[in-house]
Amino acid sequence: MIEPIGNQYVVARPVYSTKAFEEEHKKKHRHHKTLLDHLKKWFRCSAQKAKRIALSLFPIASWLPAYRIKEWLLSDIVSGISTGLVAVLQGLAFALLVTIPPRYGLYAAFFPVIIYFFLGTSRHISVGPFPVLSMMVGAVVVRLTPIADTADPTVTNSSVANDSSLDDHKVMVAATVTILSGIIQLLMGVLQLGFVVIYLSESLISGFTTAAAVHVLVSQLKFILQLTVPAHADPFSIFKVLISIFSQIEKTNIADLVTSLVVLLVVFVVKEINQRYKAKLPVPIPIELIMTVIATGVSYGFDFKNRFNVAVVGEMKSGFQTLITPNVQTFRDTIGDCFGIAIVGFAVAFSVASVYSLKYDYPIDGNQELIALGVSNIFGGSFRGFAASTALSRSGVQESTGGKTQVAGLLSAIIVLIVILAIGFLLEPLQKSVLAALALGNLKGMLMQFTEIRRLWRKDKYDCLIWVMTFIFAVVLGLGLGLAASVALQLLTIVFRTQFPKCSTLANVGRSNIYKNRKDYSEMYEPDGVKIFRCPSPIYFANISFFKQKLIDAVGFSPLRILRKRNKALKKIRKLQKKGLLQVTLKGYICTVDGFKDSDEELDNDNIEELDQPINTTDLPFQIDWNADLPFNIMVPKINLHSLILDFSAVSFLDISSMRGLKMILQEFIRIQVDVYIVGTDDDFIEKLARCEFFDDEVKDSIFFLTIHDAVLHILTKKDYSTSKFNPSQEKEAKFDFTINTNGALRNRECQVPSETKF
C-alpha cells in the first residue's frame, strides 16, 4: 500500500525476495516464442496483413488520398520549383565529384525523386545527389579507371580500349556501383535490417561528413584553378592531390580563379543573410540560381572559353540515353565500397528524415526507406545516374519554401526534366569553376561541424574521440577505408565501455530506501558487515575478470585466498585434534604442546583443488570461529563481512562463459560464510540462469530480491545480532526485534539499537 503525504509517500509492504513475490502474486508462466513460431507468424497470410504490406510498400496510397489540395498545393508548387532549380545546379556540380561529365548529374537528380515519390515515407527530404556519396563513388571510379589521360601506352589492352571513350567507361563504373549499392539497400530493406543505422552514431556521421567536406574542398581546387591533377584513390590521396596542385600552382587560370572567388564570396554572404533573416524572408534568396544565370550569361557574352581558355560544362545532349547493362566484374571489384555507399546514403537520408518527421509529427519507416532508396538507386543507375541520398541544403530549401509533401519533390523532378529535354543547352557556356564554387558554397554547414569537438569534449570523451578519429581516418585513409576504420573504432569503444565498467559501492542515503554511490554524498550509512556492490554494464566473457577484480577491491579481500587459508588451517586443526593435542572448552582452546609444525613434505602436498572445496567441519566436535584467535599461532585473515549484495539492475545480459565465472565467484564467497544476494534483475535473467542449470545446493534461487532495501532488511532480520555485534553484557540484557518503520528505516521494538547497527 502506498499512502501519499504531501510530496512524500509511505510504503508498507512485506520484505520480498524474488521467489516469495512470484509465489504470492501468482506469476504466470509465459511461453517464449521459438524461431519456428516467428517463421509461422511471418508466413501466415490474411486479408488485413496483405493490405498492411501493400500500404507499407507503397506509402503514397496512405497519404495521397488525404492530400489537402487547397491548403498544400500552392506551397508544394513554390517549393517544387525552388527545389528543382537547386537540384539542377547541385546535380551538375556533384557530377564533377564523380569525375563524369556534368550532364549525368541531371539523371541522378531526376530518376530517384520519381521512385521515392511512390515508395518513400518522408514528406520533406529531397532525394538526389549528395556530396559525400558523390565523393565515395568518384573514388571508386578513379580506382577502376586506368590513367588513360596520361598517355600511358600500357593501357592498350585494358577495358577502356573497348569503350568509345574514357568518359563512357567512368559513367559505366559509376552507374554499376550505384546499381549494386541500390541492390544492397533493397535487400537490407526486405530483410528488415534498417536497424544497422544505429551503428553509425551522430558523432561518427558528423566527423565523417566533415572529412568528406574537406575531400570535396580539395577535389574542387583543380576546377577552380583549372589544373591538370592526376586522380588518386589510395590512402593518403588527399595529400598527393595537394602536392600536385601546389607543384603547378603557377599554371592557374586566373579567369577561373577570379570567377570562382567572386561566386564563393557572394554565395557565402547571401547564405548568411538567408540564415540570419530566415524568419522575415518569405523564401530564401535562390542565390545559386541567380549566380548561375549571371555566370552563364557573362561566360557566353564575353566568350570566356575562347578568350581565357576556361573549362565549361560543354555539350548538354537533350533527352535520355539507353539503359545500361551492369558490368559483373565491376560488381566483384566494388562490393566492399558499395556496402559503405549503401549504408552512408541510408544513414544520411534517414537522419534528415527523422528530423522532419519529429518536427511535423508523422511516422517514417527505416526498412521502407531502405527499399525506397534501393529501388531509386537501381533505377537511377540503370539510366546512367550515380548514387543518391539527400542533400541537407536541398532538403532545407524544400522544407523552408513551404513544401508539405513529396508532391513538391515530384514538381522538382519536373523542373529537372525540363532542363534535360529542352533547355539544358543554355548551360553549356557555364564554367566548371562556377559549379565547383557552388558545390563549395554548400559545404559551410558541414565544415562548421568542427565546433562539435568542444561540445563533445564537455559531454562525453568517448564521443569526442570517435569524432576526431573518424575525421582523421576519413581524411588520411580515404572515405571508404576511413568509414570502415571508424565503425571498427566505434565498436571498440563500446567494448571498452562494457569491458571496463565504472563499478561502485553503494550505501544508504538519508536513512531511507535510497542507495547511492558512497563517494557522492556526505551522510551515508552502511549496515555493519554488509557490502553493496553495483555493476552498471552487461557481464560477458570479456569483462567477468574485471568484474571479479573490482568486487575484490570493494570488499577488501579475495574470497578464494581466504578459502584456501582456512582449508589449510582446518587441516592443521584436524591433525591436532586427532593427535589429542587440542581440546576445546567454554573458555577457548587448550593446547597440550608448546608448538606444532607441519613437515616440509606435508606442506608441499597441499592440493589446490582440495583447498578450493567448501569448508567441512562436521567431523569435528566443535565449531571454528574464523574471526577468533586460533591455536599454535595459526594465521587466517579475519573478515568483517557477512553479507554481500550485488546490484544487477543495470546488467542487461549474461553469457554462458561469464555465467560460469559468476557462479565461481558466488561459491567462493558462500564457502567462507558470506551470504550473497542479487537484486534488481528481471525475470528473464533468472529464467535464463535456471535453464542453464546455474542453481545447485550452494547457489540457490532464493538469493534474488526485488530491491536493495528488501535484501538489506532481510539480512538485518536474519542475522543473530546478540552474538555477532554486541558484547556479553548487551547479549544478556535483551533480544532485539527489528521491524520496518513507516519511513522505510529500521526500528527496535524492545530496546535501543546501538548506533553502529542503525541506518
Image (cartoon, grey):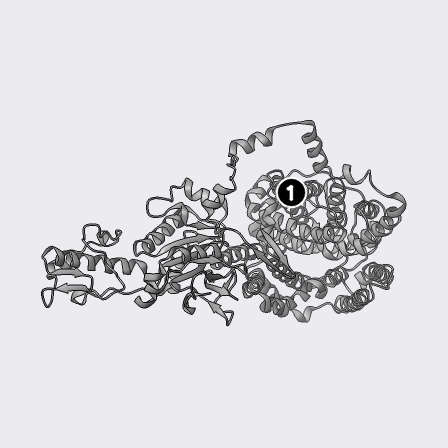
Estimate the x, y position of residue 461 in percent, counting from the top left.
55, 66
Secondary structure category for the residue under label 1: helix
Left or right: 302, with 31 as reference point: right
* Residue matched to label 1: 367
Estimate the x, y position of residue 178 in percent, counting from the top left.
65, 45
Callout 1 environment at 10 Å: few (<14), some (14 to 19), or many (20+)? Answer: many
Q: How many marks?
A: 1
Left or right: 399, with 446 as reference point: right
Q: Nearer the viewer, residue 450 or 695?
A: 695
Depicted 115 relative to depicted 578: above or below: above
Estimate the x, y position of residue 384 in percent, counting from the top left.
70, 44
Q: Which residue is found at the position 70% from the left and 68% from the top?
A: 252
Left or right: 175, with 519 as reference point: right
Estimate the x, y position of residue 55 in percent, counting from the top left.
72, 35
Q: Is residue 535 visible from the viewing direction of this image? A: no
Q: Is residue 479 visible from the viewing direction of this image? A: yes
- Report which quarter residue 477 is drawn in: bottom right
- Report which quarter residue 147 is drawn in: bottom right
Depicted 80 relative to depicted 209: above or below: above
Q: Nearer the viewer, residue 286 or 467?
A: 467
Give the residue type that dot 1 points to. Answer: Asn
- Report which quarter residue 355 is drawn in: bottom right
Q: Which residue is found at the position 62% from the left and 51% from the top?
A: 344
